[in-house]
Amino acid sequence: MAWKDAKLYAKEWLSAKNLPADLTGQTFDLVEMGTSLECQGAFRVMVLRAAARELRHRGAKLKM
């Protein structure tokens, strides 16, 4: 799978969680959130990295 696919998957995954656009000051644990991902292996890592970038872009802090 390509990085483009991982970004799209992460965007859809986060969208399904109904998170607001502005996440300033909120902290998320990607390890815990990642338990709901259905993908495996290297693609899973790529999706989690893409999700982390998206969450940071929205102002969130990450706990890893």
Image (cartoon, rainbow, N blue to C red):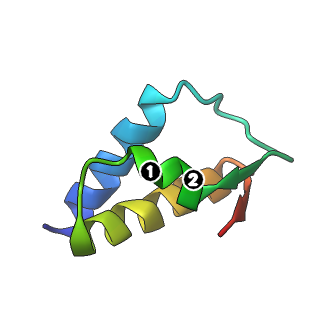
Of all residues, the one furthest to the right in this rendering is 25
Q: Quadrant of residue 57?
A: bottom right
User: Dot 1 lies on which element?
Assistant: helix
- Which residue position holds label 2? 32
User: Identity of the amino acid at label 1?
Assistant: Thr
Q: Residue at x 24, y 72 (%)?
A: 41
User: Identity of the amino acid at label 2?
Assistant: Glu
Asked whether the residues under the numbered discs 2 and 1 touch, taking CB atoms below 8 Å apart as contact, a structural biologist would say yes
Residue 4 in the image: x percent, y percent?
24, 61
User: Dot 2 lies on which element?
Assistant: helix
Q: Nearer the viewer, residue 36 or 10?
A: 36
In the picture, measured across the screen, residue 18 lies left or right of residue 23, that is: left
Badge 2: residue crowd in 10 Å (few <14, some 14–19, many ≥20): few
How many marks the image carries: the answer is: 2
Residue 59 in the image: x percent, y percent?
74, 51
Badge 1: residue crowd in 10 Å (few <14, some 14–19, many ≥20): few
Instruction: Measure how far apart labels 2 and 1 are at the Cα level.
Output: 6 Å
